[in-house]
Image (cartoon, rainbow, N blue to C red):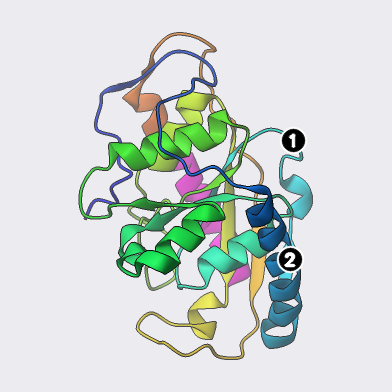
Amino acid sequence: MSTGAEPVDDAVAPTRMTRPRSELVPIRGWAKALYAAFRVVATAVARVMWRFEVNGRDRLPTVGPYVLAPVHRSNLDFLLAGLAVPRRMRFMTKDTIWRAPRFGRFIESVGAFPVDRQNPDRGALRKAEASVANGEPVVMFPEGTRREGPAVTGLFDGPAWVACRQRVPIVPMAIGGADRAMPIGSKMIRLSKVRVVIGEPIYPDVPLTGRIPRRVVSEVTEQLNKELQALYDEVR
């Protein structure tokens, strides 16, 4: 199944930090304040409910954009990834959330944008690129959808594609315990220890100008896969 964030061209375009056309909803001042306030409250709740713990936060770039690439085992992962990172993030989110139009518009106003997981979605990739080009870190789940089990496999190239095109690092993240706190198919949230481990940033070895072969994108995805597996083995 395609995540919709799977690149479909054979090579990646040239210019560093290009600004692709996009329809990203601008984040207003009230939305930034709401995001910050919600993060404070949600972090306090997470520490009580899940004894929420983050390791490796010092590995995150403190300035400049990057692609955050977490494993995906639970609907809670979006929340947990946002709580683990001090900076405000943009999130590539499944488009089915927009079936509730008011809620869709609300989460879009605070930084989310939809991706069609059934078909290649160039628009979602352009929005991810535009986020990075605007200096905003973006969360993209390389597994595309929630998975079960200990193996991190079948990663899509979308996150690596954006990182290579925009010449920014990609940061692996493993989330342990979210699959117990809210398993696939469950609508209930359970008490369970949740721990996040952030890995070292992966800096794509790409030229500052010129086209980037698809092979390089695949190599970054393969490296990301290895790092995510090691982190997930550690955190489970």
Q: In the image, is 150 to the left or to the right of 194?
A: left
Question: Residue farthest to the top?
Answer: 210
Magenta-span inclusion, residue 190: no
Would residue 126 be visible to someone looking at this image? yes
Residue 44, quarter of the rendered image: bottom right
Front-most of 163 and 91?
91
Q: Residues within 10 Å of mark 1 (few under 14, many from 20)?
A: few
Single out the mark in the foreground, 2 or 1: 2
Residue 40, quarter of the rendered image: bottom right
Residue type, label 2: Ala
Q: Position of residue 179 (x, y in %)?
A: 48, 78
- Which disc number belongs to residue 84? none
Q: Position of residue 198 (x, y in %)?
A: 66, 55
Residue at image x 26%, y 23%? Answer: 10
Front-most of 35 and 159?
35
Task: List the residue tagged with mark 2.
Answer: 37
> What is the span of residues highlighted in magenta in the rendered image?
220-236
Q: Position of residue 76 (x, y in %)?
A: 52, 73
Front-most of 226 and 5?
5
